[in-house]
Amino acid sequence: MDAGYMSSSHKSRSRCPLQEQFIQRKNNRENLDRFIPNRAAMDFDYAHYMVTDGRKGKENPAVSSPSREAYRKQLAEAFNMNRTRILAFKNKPPTAIEPIPRELLSSSSSSSIPHTKAAKPRRHIPQSSERTLDAPDIMDDFYLNLLDWGSSNVLAIALGSTVYLWDASNGSTSELVTIDDEDGPVTSISWAPDGRHIAVGLNNSHVQLWDSTSNKQLRTLSGGHSQRVGSLDWNNHILTTGGMDGRIINNDVRVRSHIVETYRGHHQEVCGLKWSASGQQLASGGNDNLLHIWDRSVASSNAPTQWLHRLEDHTAAVKALAWCPFQGNLLATGGGGGDQSIKFWNTHTGACLNSINTGSQVCALLWNKHERELLSSHGFTQNQLTLWKYPSMVKMTELTGHTSRVLFMAQSPDGCTVASAAGDETLRFWNVFGTPEVAKPAPKANPEPFAHVSRIR
């Protein structure tokens, strides 16, 4: 079993949810005063010369001849002594350095060696979060899923018994719903593909469906689970729910009798659910250390088992699941504190393609939509986000800032920004995946001659 809920003694209930934290940052520029000279930028030898010998010619103009004055000016220009100020109030600007010497550029342009394609410049990854919001009362529970970013660019987060919406386009915050104490707290949330409707799983085994535009509850799904619903995922109009009772239920939200399929295979809480992009395969992870791959064709047939693959390689709870965006049958999974590994699977064959030890609890996984990279979030000891290059699994960078395990991650619709929420009651935004290249518009086809003239049939 993995460490689930952890109480926090530092929680502050007086903070407003999703308010930005303004952290005092160090300024790279020196705090210079325009009335106090900067001794580090002064040339004391030149200052002494100007105060003593350097001004004799100006004080006794009769002694200086025209030829001597011309020689003095040339000498001053050569030795940078034609300055008028003695005191300095700011640092000198750094000397510009050519990145490539001109002689090399000229020689390369005249060379007969054919030009090869320029190497792609290395992407800059900021090491600190670009924004930090307060997330008071967030549950520090490994098995829950309390953060999701919808296709309409609105991020939803459950803080205790309340679901808040944060609009990334303008930074506004609104409250969607507060659940009654006897039904809450909220144990999972998941946006529908349309970015308007959202599912809210509860501690009382029910799931509520809400319209975020009108802030109205549409319906309640009940009768499928007997304990809390900690994981949710959508497959078009099918909402799949995973409960502490070990059951996985497919709910058709369009019909009154919503339960259409029930998958049985886990013996403990289902803490991870992810449908593949094709909607054909479902990955589920549980506190029983099991990973199941369910195929819709197998699950609905008369096969002896419902699952396509039952994988027992992990040695701790399996919550982190991520389908690869550029290879449909590639699945990445992460194990809890007793496992600490990231594994890669061919879901067609059930083969484990690779496994790496990360050294800490793996809480969440996200693929980069634009590059072959994988982001993982972790617990003790660093509570970091780690970016890996796939398939070499070389660490590209580690992002730190959270002071408690980073339980939840969500990706913006454009795939650039990642939001992370942790037991330290903060929600941080990281520009870790960079800016996607803007697709060039397709060239307009040349119109046919006389296209505007009606054809004779």
Image (tube, rainbow, N blue to C red):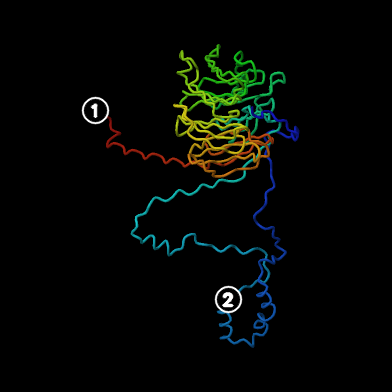
Q: Residue tagged by mark 2? A: 79
Whether residue 170 is visible to the viewer of this picture, yes or no, is no
Residue furthest out toward the left: 457
Whether residue 153 is visible to the viewer of this picture, yes or no, is yes
Q: Residue tagged by mark 1? A: 456
Type of amino acid under label 2: Phe
Q: Is residue 431 left or right of residue 136?
A: left
Quadrant for the C terminus in the image:
top left
Q: Quadrant of residue 109?
A: bottom left
Q: Position of residue 364 (x, y in %)?
A: 58, 33
Q: Secondary structure at mark 2?
A: loop
Viewer-side label of 1, 2 = 2
**Residue 128 higher or lower than 328, as above or below:** below
Question: Badge 2 local density, few (<14 within 10 Å), some, or many (20+)?
Answer: few
Q: Secondary structure at mark 1?
A: loop
Q: Nearer the viewer, residue 274 or 441?
A: 274
Question: Badge 1 local density, few (<14 within 10 Å), some, or many (20+)?
Answer: few
Q: Is residue 122 left or right of residue 271?
A: left
Q: Position of residue 16 (x, y in %)?
A: 71, 34
